[in-house]
């Protein structure tokens, strides 16, 4: 009996991983176009020189495909084994809304007022003035970032440390560091001071909050919370049109 029933759950988890990976890839691919062709073309060419930008983009797409596949497999195959909620379900999503919606709104307002609006003034492309591109950044962050940072990396960290709260702290610290490193791509150097502290605090709060939502309620809830957090891009685009 076990020989006939065991493959079904495994096949379902693999299908789940395929869906997550596909959605994450579709969310991030247009973002590469925005990053390298619309907002930061000169910076992108300098960053990959002497390799032609088109060839670098092809390599990036391949690497992103591998990354989202690995992260989706990690989340689907190992998440529930280590005390995480995995992808979650409709019941968990409904139960989470009273928490993730207001928390996402607080993060959106707090991170934008504390740091984002100042960064937008210094590097306009990080916060697009176009509503269409702002919506793209919202989707990319909610789907791709959650699939990689929480569903993939946080799951693997939890498998290593066996404690969801430690895994959340580790992933938040890791992605806060990566976010600060990414500013170099845009030519932004932030000296030590209140502005840098605001940047680090904003990023850490976001990653910790989304990690908590993922651990307790699953990927669907952390995606929802991240989407609400990223409404700051839409709000900025609306303000820019005034």
Image: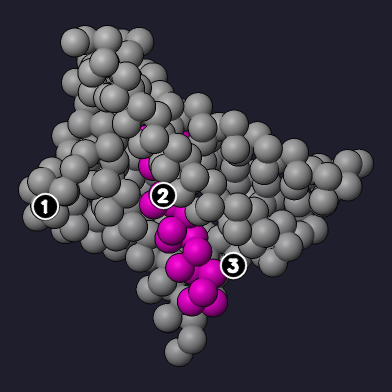
Residue 48 in the image: state x and y as whole percent.
81, 42
Residue 197 in the image: state x and y as whole percent.
42, 43
Which element type, helix, strand or loop, lies under badge 1?
helix
Q: How far apart in space, not on screen, are marks 3 and 2 (Cα)?
A: 23 Å
Question: Badge 2: how crowded within 10 Å, few (<14), some, or many (20+)?
Answer: many
Query: Is 150 in the magenta?
Result: yes
Q: Identify the mark at residue 94; answer none if there is no mark.
A: 1
Q: Identify the mark at residue 124; answer none if there is no mark.
A: 3
Residue sitting at x 82%, y 51%: 54
User: In the rendered view, does 87 fall on the left or right side of 230?
Assistant: left
What segment carries the magenta color? 130-151
Earlier residue among tags 2 and 1? 1
Query: Is 145 in the magenta?
Result: yes
Earlier residue among tags 1 and 3? 1
Which element type, helix, strand or loop, lies under badge 2?
helix
Residue 11 in the image: state x and y as whole percent.
36, 27
Residue sitting at x 60%, y 65%: 125
Residue position for label 2: 143
């Amino acid at each position: 009996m076990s020989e006939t029933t065991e493959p079904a759950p495994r096949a379902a988890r693999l299908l789940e991983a395929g869906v997550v990976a596909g959605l994450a890839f579709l969310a991030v691919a247009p973002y590469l176009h925005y990053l390298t062709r619309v907002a930061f073309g000169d910076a992108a060419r300098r960053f990959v020189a002497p390799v032609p930008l088109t060839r670098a983009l092809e390599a990036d797409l391949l690497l992103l495909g591998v990354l989202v596949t690995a992260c989706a497999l990690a989340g689907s195959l190992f998440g529930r084994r280590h005390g995480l909620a995995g992808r979650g379900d409709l019941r968990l999503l409904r139960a989470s809304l009273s928490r993730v919606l207001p928390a996402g709104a607080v993060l959106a307002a707090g991170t934008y007022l504390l740091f984002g609006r100042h960064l937008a003034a210094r590097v306009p492309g990080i916060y697009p003035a176009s509503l269409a591109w702002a919506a793209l950044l919202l989707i990319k962050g909610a789907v791709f970032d959650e699939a990689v940072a929480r569903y993939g990396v946080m799951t693997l960290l939890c498998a290593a440390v066996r404690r969801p709260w430690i895994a959340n702290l580790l992933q938040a610290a890791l992605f806060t560091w990566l976010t600060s490193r990414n500013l170099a791509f845009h030519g932004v150097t932030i000296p030590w001071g209140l502005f840098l502290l605001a940047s680090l605090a904003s990023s850490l709060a976001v990653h910790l909050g989304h990690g908590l939502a993922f651990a307790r309620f699953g990927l669907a809830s952390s995606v929802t919370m991240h989407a609400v957090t990223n409404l700051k891009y839409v709000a900025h685009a609306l303000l820019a049109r005034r």
